[in-house]
Image: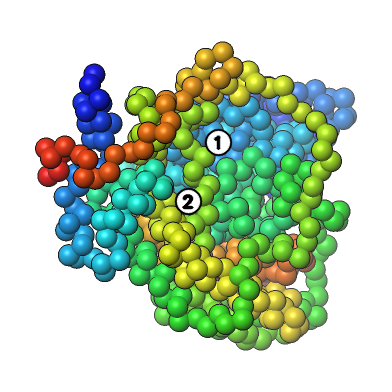
Amino acid sequence: MLGRTLREVSAALKQGQITPTELCRKCLSLIQKTKFLNAYITVSEEVALKQAEESEKRYKKGQSLGDLDGIPIAVKDNFSTSGIETTCASNMLKGYVPPYNATVVQKLLDQGALLMGKTNLDEFAMGSGSTDGVFGPVKNPWSYSKQYREKKQQNPRGESEDSNWLITGGSSGGSAAAVSTFTCFAALGSDTGGSTRNPAAHCGLVGFKPSYGLVSRHGLIPLVNSMDVPGILTRYVDDTAIVLDILAGHDPKDSTTVQEPVKSFILPTLTDVSKLCIGIPKEYLVPELSSEVRSLWSKAADLFESEGAKVIEVSLPHTCYSIICYHVLCTSEVASNMARFDGLEYGHRCDINVSTEAMYAATRREGFNDVVRGRILSGNFFLLKENYENYFIKAQKVRRLIANDFVNVFNSGVDVLLTPTTLCEAVPYLEFIKEDNRTRSAQDDIFTQAVNMAGLPAVSIPVSLSSKGLPVGLQFIGRAFCDQQLLTVAKWFEKQVQFPVIQLPQLLDDCSLSLENEKLASVSLKQ
Amino acid sequence: MCARAVWLAFRAPLGGRRGFTCQADSQGSGRITAEVIEHLERLALVDFGSREAVVRLEKAVAFADRLRAVNTDGVEPMESVLEDRCLYLRSDNVAEGNCAEELLQNSHFVVEEYFVAPPGNISLPRLGEQEPSQQT
């Protein structure tokens, strides 16, 4: 049951094959079993069971609210949830209980979804590994998968060889781990520079970033106001579309959401790709790209071509400056957004009471970790009077050039761009921490952040397992507000590649998983 | 507690180990001077805390410097991708509120319906005003 698509589970709930409470309990028990992954910061067991009870009443009366009624979901811990602690994995907000729900959370709850808990992340969503939060790093469930362990020639049922576990990617790593271990059917992440797509690629999930302005940011603790969007992580593209259908639309509480009415996101089944034009940006072929990912990227392009689509090479000339531009704009906006944390109205407050400045300074020193402080200081540097023109304004100009690059490419007839999501598969934690957070972010965000600067929709689709038995994802980028078209193409591609289900024998023996994915024989991009 | 002792008490956590700034000068690009460090710390109300942090800032700045290679003549800065649209403004009517109690609950120090702040208009002491014993 847990491995099925959202629609299948929803149908099962309507037919009474399973009740919301049973589903909820199964997921809660899995959360307990996967505790060592550290995916959840807060597990809202009582809340979830109560919601399940109410959902069950609705189903008995035949009055279900929709496809999401009774479906377990998880939310990244930088979304405000009323009555449930929201920490952003930081000392600054430990113990902070928001008095309101983020709009996206409210929308999911209004549809009857069961909130399983708040997931772990990098502190304040700054990072690309989900390793820098105050509650510790998140472990990638694929580190314990049969597929990975067999390649490493380890006992597939052994749990003791734990020291070289892999990162999930970040910063929505907790959400990714939660979905990939079947503890929920969908999870909310946030995407500022790739924070939803990066862990999706490393954990074998569909990671979707909507167009900027499509989904409300009200209640999402802001990092970079001009680039943040809530992201969606699921196991299937169809599930993403169902969730997006609920979340998209104007919100009076977020004036950066567009006012046009949104159409439904129910995805048609694409059978004929001959009218599609796929663009392959040549500047994304960087030397650091692993040969396996490059090969999969190339095979994917060939697949589209063999099915009749037009596949052309395109150019995004300012690509090499995009990560630098992102770095300047991100730190500058962060410096501004983090100024609200002064200890007075909410959050951590230090013991010093001599003066407001001293209190603020000590509170912020105690509350933020090195990464956050580093970004605040860098941001303030770029915003100094003498630097403003040369750094901040300059970066804003470069941002326009980057956004224009995409506009030009889409205007030349390209429907969707196809790029890698990450340079390689998930790396071991011990390897990852050899470099500092800023360096890693600059390396790992390389394919994903340009999309945030241009405000375009993008999705990472899991393609195949690498030679190490780990997931590799590829990214599709669409035109602004053409999210439905993007997901339609992604759904077609997903069907073609038939990405395998994760096998976690020691955890999932007693749960029946859908093996439909493995049964169907079709074109696959296995190495 | 006398004023000076109070200064020592709150200044101590805030970069009491000031020696690193001199070292940074000799190793760094020279742009991140002790004055810049102090200025940033006051503006951000966040301290560097260590020499590594200063080095990281220098690297960040060096990284950002690479933008100079881009020709941006005649290009307007882009603030938002939605610049061609008008932001939504709702009508100026009271729609919600009256939640003072809920909001006050999250604060550590509240007196009746006030958030309590320490006295303002006292700036952080400058580097030179620190006690000599604090500088290592």
Q: Residue furthest top?
A: B112
Question: What residue is drawn where x is 21% and y is 28%?
Answer: B4
Total of numbered circles in the picture?
A: 2
- Between the C-alphas of marks 2 and 1, the distance is 25 Å
Q: Mark 1 points at which residue?
A: A118
Which residue corresponds to the image point at 35% horizontal and 52% vertical from the top-left?
Answer: B39
In this view of the protein, which residue sits in the foreground, A284 or A2? Answer: A284
Q: Is mark 2 on a helix, strand or loop?
A: helix
Q: Quadrant of the N terminus of chain A?
A: top right
Whole-percent x, y for residue A418 in the image: 62, 74
Q: Which amino acid does label 1 sit on?
A: Lys
In x, y percent, where is residue A38? 44, 39
Q: Nearer the viewer, mark 2 or mark 1?
A: 2
Query: Residue B69's mark?
Result: none
Subunit bearing disc 2: A
Relative height, residue A472 to residue A365 (above, below)? below
Which residue is rendered at x = 62% and y = 32% of the image?
A81
In the image, A96 versus A139, the foreground residue is A96
Of helix, strand and loop, which one carries label 1?
strand
Q: Name the residue under label 2.
A: A335
